[in-house]
Amino acid sequence: MEHSHDMLKRICIFFGDYATYLLGCGANCTRISKNVNRMADRFGVKVDMLMLATHCVITVWDSEHGHSYHESRSQMKVPLSFAANTNLSKLSWDVYEGKTDLNGAIERFQQITSEKRIPTWVVMVLVSIANASFCRLFGGDFTSMGIVALATWVGYYLKVALLTAGVDARLMFIACSFISSVIGASAYIFHLGGTPDLALGTSVLYLVPGVHYINSVSDLLDGHYLTAFSRFMMASVLTVCLSLGLTGGILLMNLSIF
């Protein structure tokens, strides 16, 4: 299939948008590469991708006629979304199976990426319940669960507010873990419940960057060493920031638990 420069440009721009959106919403490199190459086979082009933690470089070419196009993109700053991950993967299969063409794929991509997300208050409730459940899983009593739920609610509210204001993620981690640990320490201060240590320890678990750690291991196993290292270091820095906030809360409340 012969491709004009304009067609290759459109395909490359679409692949750039597609890959960087997946990179931002929590996909690992293998998924992104497989999805893009699947669509490239259908469009009759070849594609090379270089993926880093925050950037993606894509070259699309029609080797038969010598046409090529190059695109370099930064990762889209979008929230983690497993729903978008799934829907974009399904889109790649629909393209591969001939259910949609390039124009249809671009339209579907825009629909998927503009879909309304779950309301923030619903996410806050679910995260609070999940974190309180972690407290129970580790042996916490119901009083500690209530304290953890409150600490998570307040911390997550602060997280949303700071991210909306454009505050750096590292500062956000420190601030949120600090406020959550102060609330979690109330079990010690006011002698609430029988498991104050678990209330304090699990009050900040909602901030653990688990997706980054999982993706770093996945990328390492699949040979994407630069991305794996970058993601691991990013997750490690966020974990250190979480620990700084937790330590600050413990010191402020003058707890001697070590």
Image (cartoon, grey):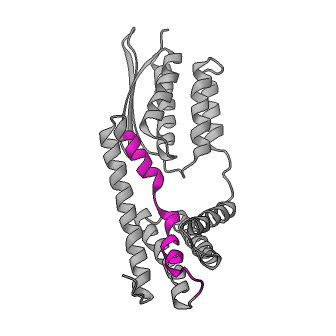
Magenta span covers which residues? 192-219
Residue at 50%, 66% in the rendered image? 205
- Magenta stretch, main secondary structure class: helix
Identify which residue, 243 or 163, lies in the foreground: 243
Residue 54 appears anywhere in the view: no
Residue at 40%, 80% in the rendered image? 248
Identify which residue, 212 or 161, lies in the foreground: 212
In the rendered image, residue 132, in percent from the top left (x then y), is placed at: 61, 68
Identify which residue, 52 or 197, lies in the foreground: 197
In the rendered image, residue 154, in percent from the top left (x then y), is placed at: 59, 74
Q: In which quarter of the image is residue 30?
A: top left
Number of labels in the image equals: 0
Note whether 57 is above or below 191 in the view shown: above
In the rendered image, residue 147, in percent from the top left (x then y), is placed at: 60, 78
Residue at 45%, 17% in the rendered image? 45
Examine the structure image and report whether residue 213 is included in the region drawn in magenta. yes
Identify which residue, 6 or 59, lies in the foreground: 59
Compared across the picture, whether 191 is left or right of 63 comes to: right
Residue 99 appears anywhere in the view: yes
In the rendered image, residue 212, in percent from the top left (x then y), is placed at: 43, 51
Residue at 59%, 70% in the rendered image? 157
Q: In which quarter of the image is residue 243?
A: bottom left
Note whether 222 is above or below 233 in the view shown: above
Examine the structure image and report whether residue 39 is included in the region drawn in magenta. no
Which of the image's four quarters has the C terminus? bottom left
